[in-house]
Image: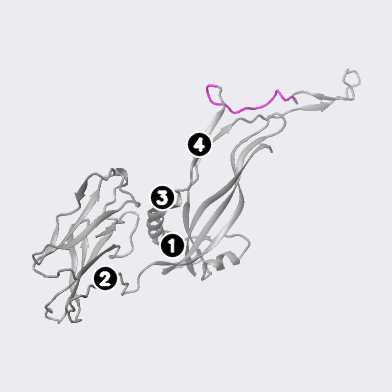
Amino acid sequence: MVTGLFQFDPGAGYDFGRRQFAVAYDDGMGNLIFEAYTVSSNLQTSSPLFTPIALQNVNTGARFSIAAGGYRGVKDAQNPLWELGFNRLSDMPDANSNFVYVGLIGVASGQIVTYISAANQQFYPDLRMPVMAYDYDGDSIYLGAPVHVTVEQVLNTDFVLQEPPKHAYYDNNASSPTFGQIVSVSREDSFNVQLQDSTGTTFSSRSTDTSDFDVGGSVSASASGTVEEGEDVGIEEAEDSTTVTVSAEATYDYKEHQESYDSQYASRTVSFSGVTDHDDYLTGRLQLFDIWRYRVYGISTTDSQGKPSNAFYEIVLPGPTLNFAGGG
């Protein structure tokens, strides 16, 4: 039995973080059977994803293996479904003297899409060969070693309440009773601004931190080199070709793990109760951000001048905060 992403319908609750399962077994009559199921959200019922597939009269016994994965190439956010790979051993060789057979089942279609003999190793009674993905034509896209960047004291204001204009003047009219004095026109604490909702109560807002990702390019060959190049930690905005090519794979990878990335972020409610009696009033927080940047291998990209560059993929995770409120 293996688990995999065999059903994808976010509106119905089947998102990147949910898995289904597939099984393979010998039915005792020489047939190798493959089945796949989805389980209800309450874990009470299961439903088949396709009609059971049978390799008849193969007499495999326990000499088979299955595995789930994206065996038909790089996935994207619109077509993320996995396939079911399998192999089996035979007692008798085929016309090419092969004893080992491999195949691929498209779970979405419920059909075997590939089934070939693959190896001429002689049959061994106890041999059970595991299925493994192998990029024989070298067109995989994969990530290199990351560099971890920490950006500290990022200012994020929840609101800025501006003090209204307050006026005072120096009275230089000799006939005035306030001659030679500074006269306040509107410099009073009672002349201020408050933020309230339509019912006159203190206004509040609710928000939740979330992670995010981005793609970009650089002439640097390593993720650490992009940080050492300058004082900032930015990378050049990716060209359209880079964005289209890399973002599809990056979106799939990020969304598959987003639930775990965001699992520690709780929502927060901020109440705005400041008064601009002496100054503008600010409420916000200073926050730390963790950036994990990876070099993307297996893809060719160019910069804005058309020169070769390297693609990078980074994940940004909000960190601890320090709240502040007061005059500014």
**4 or 1: tag closer to the N-terminus:** 4
Disc 2 target residue: 130
Q: CA distance from mark 3 to mark 2?
A: 30 Å
Q: Earlier in the sequence, mark 1 or mark 2?
A: 2
Image quarter of residue 94: bottom left
Magenta segment main secondary structure: loop
Residue 235 locus on image (x, y percent): 54, 61
- The residue tagged with tag 2: helix, strand or loop? loop
Nearer to us of marks 2 and 4 is 2
Q: Which residues are magenta?
A: 188-199
Q: From the top left corner, tell me how far across and down residue 110 is, in percent.
A: 18, 57
User: How many numbered marks have been drawn onto this rendered protein structure?
Assistant: 4
Q: CA distance from mark 2 to mark 4?
A: 50 Å
Residue indicated by mark 4: 206
* In this view, the mark in front (1 or 2): 2
Q: Which mark is residue 224?
A: none
Disc 3 from disc 4: Cα separation: 20 Å
What residue appears at the point 35 percent right and 54 percent down from the top-left corner?
A: 77
